[in-house]
Image: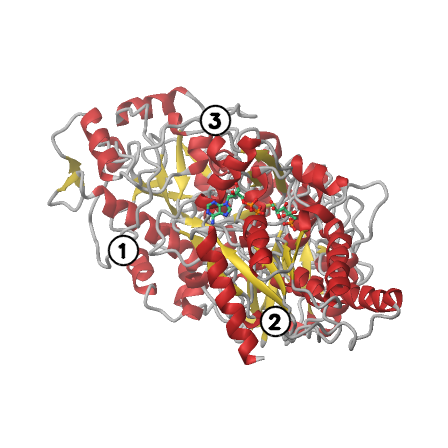
Amino acid sequence: MDDDTSSGLLGVGAIVWVRRRNGSWWPGKILSPEQLPSAPLTSPRSGTPVKLLGREDASVDWYNLEKSKRVRPFRCGEFDDCIERAVASLGMPPKKREKYARREDAILHALELEKQMLGDVLPLDNGHVRRAEATDEELLLRSNSLHQGAPRMRDLQDFGLKIVSSKRRDSPSVKPKMRHVGHHSQHDEDGDFVDSGLTSRSKRTRSADDTDAGTTESDFSVSVSDSAETEHHDDDDDDDDEETTSVSDYLGGQKGRRDFESTSSEDLDDSILSEDSGRQFHRNTGVANGSVSKWQLKGKRNIRNLPKRHVDDIERLHANGRRFTSRRRVPIWRSDDYRDYDFSYSIDSDNGDDDEEEEDYGAGDDSQDTENDACGVDDDYAPIPRALSRDRNLHTGWDHVAWEGDYYNPMMSAQLRLGDKDRSMLVEVDLKVVARYQIDPEKRLPIISMTSKLNGNSIIGHTIQIEAIGDGSSDNLVSASYKANEAIDSYALPSGWRTARRTANVRLRRPTPSSIDGDEDGRDFPFSLQHETSPTRVSGGGVSGRKGLLVRKGAASRNHLPQVGKSLSGKTLKKVGSSSSQKIRTLSSIALEQKQVSRSLHDGLDYQTDGIIKPSSSGPTTVACIPVKLVYSRLLEKINRPPSKAVLNSLNREWRCHRLEVIGAINKTKMQADRDEGEITSQQCVPPSSSVLVVIMGVAGAGKSTIGRMLSEVVNGEFLDADDFHPPSNKEKMHNGIPLSDEDRLPWLQLLRHALLERSTSGKSVILACSALQEQYREILRSADPNYQLGSFSCRVKFVLLDVSPDMVAARLAARAAQGNHFMSPLLLQSQLDLLRICDAEGVFKVNAALSPRAIVKEIEDWLGRIASHD
Ligand SMILES: Nc1ncnc2c1ncn2[C@@H]1O[C@H](COP(=O)(O)OP(=O)(O)O)[C@@H](O)[C@H]1O
Ligand SMILES: O=C(O)[C@H](O)[C@@H](O)[C@H](O)[C@H](O)COP(=O)(O)O
């Protein structure tokens, strides 16, 4: 066994290199069993768990540290080149960097963890470190204190592990050339969690010895090259003690996810290829013209996995001295610059003259290995699109990923770049809405709590912008074809090494193989861009809400060989078939779909749009992709609450449409009214110039009735209180704290409009107290002026806003409610405040409603005088 191991340098918390079953080496961190989730394992694990780095939700493999030749200290000299290269890659141009980003990120992650450890350890001359003089407990405390504020590793906490701190902290940047800084064994150096069961190295290895890890399987293939890479793989493979098992579902997931991942490692195993000394192996069996990879011929485990190997995963296949490289990764999610990205398959001459990087990583030009196989980036998972961004501008790379502090915000509306197009995407989420009232009597306001099933987070409490998108405005659906309840907790995982990471930090689970039609499908990415040259087998298990965008992967890609020179237009966005057993209801069911499909047909991507996934009457619905605005509007409708201001702001487009509808309605009713009025002509209804038509507007409790009444006396006009025009049903609704809907308001507003119109002929001034919170409501009232041109705001009907602070109005409403002489529930204040919107162009006169009634009336009077003189 390695000296480093026996000397205790490979204890809990140590950063190590581990060799995966495919022969690749990958940075990892030794965990204690206590740091693992407590969910029951479906198969016994033994040895020491090592969490692979590079992703917070990366897999955990198990190694027998005592015997293993597969575990090396991170700083053991053998991997210096790799480390240097990773550090150097920070300065590389994005495209170059991207190539091997996965493992480099893992290395950089390791470096960051290592750096964090430096505060607790003393360097030794030999390049390793020893712990400072301190007990484990002291070290732990120190570590805790050092890492106060470190991003929480949510997944661990979710599994009941203690979390050091929930406070966020910026990850330190990686310093290049940080060499020969060894490891200490006891720290939870990344601050993820407290190692409540810190044990000495000897304890750990003892337990490793006590058990046999022979039933485990390795997860992924990482083509890595180091000196160690030359180690004979077969030997290791025969060492059952060193077989590894993926429990990524534990660390990356939520409680109760075990079932889902029970076959994960099998799949993962299937999806990998060994790499001996950087040589490439055929990844696939299905269309490889009978070629059988070396991997397949090795030992029972490989044979065992043969039937599960992908047929469509032809990443590299050697045929007649040619290597076909299928760039199967999902370029739209990964490329830093999609304009430059080569989506094509390529046929590269494979004369063994791989360039250095190919040798090093064993991945050749196909970065898929390094990207997808590495460190938990398995075929099970698809990365989250890095193009997810906060706004609709072009964004490329991680800089623009929607981070909320250390948290990735999956709800950010997204756009990604494909070709020269800005393309938005939808992220599939499940939303729950709960309407409730806060207990606080002062603020008994209705709130909506939306919970994302992606990560279980409540949207309230997170500053999540929700950008409404128009129907059909999303070109790509980022859908996890995983069970909805297999939430991708990693969406919200903190970034432990943000300074370094360049690759997606999350991965989407693919469906459990048992739940899909054809096990090979289950090993694919949920989506990938592939050629589609032959009809795709229709999934028997799923239904896509967007068949034009999402096509079942599997037979589609295995039935045809890679082609040369295909451009993006030859690709089809695919999705692993639907596996969800949970029916996700599509709210729109989806009129949107057709638009989407047709748009896809014309957007230059040539998405395959027909016949790929057909709804199955028997199969479960698996894709629910609904514009957030639609979700909101439906849900708000359900609970009879108008959207919040924030939502409204984000729904401008929708409201503009709505306004047009309302205006349409106004026009209709206006014409009707004109007909009804008969004798009332525009000439007739022009009142004497001294008369005014004034609407005192504002939220409930602003003082409209009080001021309106007083003003009407001052101007010798008639006072109308809009409250008196409500039908009983409206009053009852409001009394019960339920805001009116526009359907409720429209006839009420029409009635008011008619009342104004009627009285405008009398030559008498009319003062109307009416909330009139929205422009479209006011437009209805303005249309009482027969000469009014909608949208011109040049009208005889004038508006005065009683501008009042929420606190003040809340107090007034409370006082009014205490008197018990008003139907309006104070609970509606928030919705009133949310609704109130005034456009400057409207020329609404705003008065400070905190003034005394008399002062307010005076101000209004003066203003009326001013505008009268202008007129
Ligand atoms: N300028 C003001 N200063 C102090 N109290 C006011 C003022 N305006 C109105 N109020 C009081 O606030 C409460 C709400 O006024 P009200 O006229 O009924 O508002 P609204 O008609 O806008 O709902 C009433 O109790 C009223 O006496
Ligand atoms: O005096 C008030 O408290 C308000 O004027 C209230 O009674 C009004 O009738 C509603 O606010 C109308 O509904 P909307 O304001 O929701 O349109």
Sequence-wise first label, 3 or 1: 3
Using residue 76 as the reference point, say whether residue 590 is left or right of it. Answer: right
- What numbered label is drawn on residue 174? 1
The residue under label 3 is 45
Q: Closer to the N terminus: mark 1 or mark 2?
A: 1
- Residue drawn at x 42%, y 69% as measured from the top left: 94
For the residues bearing labels 1 and 2, Cβ distance under 8 angstroms: no
The secondary element bearing badge 2 is classed as loop
Residue in the foreground of this view, choosing between 716 and 791: 716
Q: Which residue is mark 2?
A: 344
Residue 827 x %, y %: 57, 38
Q: Name the quadrant of the C terminus.
A: bottom right
State left or right for residue 625 relative to residue 81: right
N-term-proximal mark, 2 vs 3: 3
What is the spatial separation of the Cα atoms under label 2 and label 3, in whole angstroms? 41 Å
For the point 36% across and 53% down, the residue is: 498
Above/below status of 460 relative to 34: below
